[in-house]
Amino acid sequence: MSAADDPLSSVSRETLSRLQRLSEELARWTPAINLVARGTLADRWSRHILDSAQVWALRPPGARRWADFGSGGGFPGLVVAILAAEQDPGLQVTLVESDQRKAAFLRHVLRDTGVTAQVLSDRVEALDPLNADVVSARALAPLDRLCELTLPHLAPGGVALFPKGARHAEEVATARRSWRFQLDSVPSLTDPQGVVLKMKGLTRV
């Protein structure tokens, strides 16, 4: 990845320090509660933090509410909250994580870094509509299921941002059987076979 492509190239030293703190706590907590696959910890800056920062870089202008589903170890939602603290402090970030231990991790890192975000330790299906301008999710579910989870929570004109791996085209084809959406597939900066799916106009077929 070139410096021009690096979504963290222009952030402050304080933001980098917060992201480094997230990285350290991820390594410390993962052996106990499986926040991410242990095999990815050695390369966690690229695999998780940069991978999440590229999602932040695709946000639409003027977004006021961001909801991240299945936040787990904080990706991309906690990285979004850390970057928003510097670059868009008016953005309200909500992290949805039904696993109580993972939700506790998210709250711990938020306290540790002094970053503000809401953590909802409940299932997405159980929540009242969040009216989010952006919905994100990473490694949570196939795309057709993500569409089902997202629709009740996406504000009119809102955007969904979903990082996907090598089988993204297959997932899109399956989702189009039940859903209509405008799609921009943005090549991933961290996975040669991956993309970030940027979706608008989500409706049922």
Image: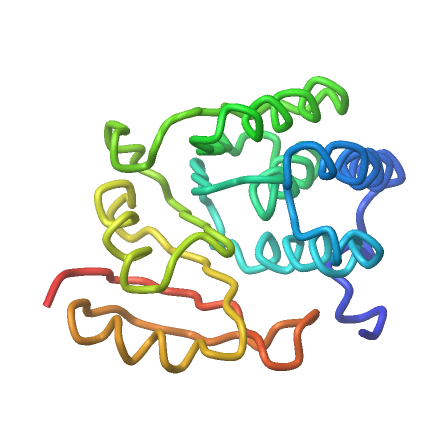
Residue 181: x %, y % from top left:
25, 68
Examine the image and state in which quarter residue 187 appears. Answer: bottom right
The quadrant of the image that shows the N terminus is bottom right
The residue located at (37%, 55%) in the rendering is 159
Residue 123 against residue 182 in the figure, above or below:
above
The residue located at (61%, 57%) in the rendering is 57
> How is this picture coloured?
rainbow
Residue 81: x %, y % from top left:
61, 36
Q: Is residue 82 left or right of residue 103?
A: right
Residue 202 against residue 35 in the figure, above or below:
below
Residue 191 against residue 140 in the figure, above or below:
below
Examine the image and state in which quarter residue 23 appears. Answer: top right
Q: Is residue 162 left or right of residue 147?
A: right
Q: How many marks?
A: 0
Q: Is residue 114 left or right of residue 204?
A: right
| Residue sitting farthest toward the left | 205
The residue located at (36%, 81%) in the rendering is 170
Q: Is residue 144 left or right of residue 64?
A: left
Residue 172 against residue 179 in the figure, above or below:
below
The residue located at (54%, 26%) in the rendering is 103
Residue 9: x %, y % from top left:
82, 57
The quadrant of the image that shows the C terminus is bottom left
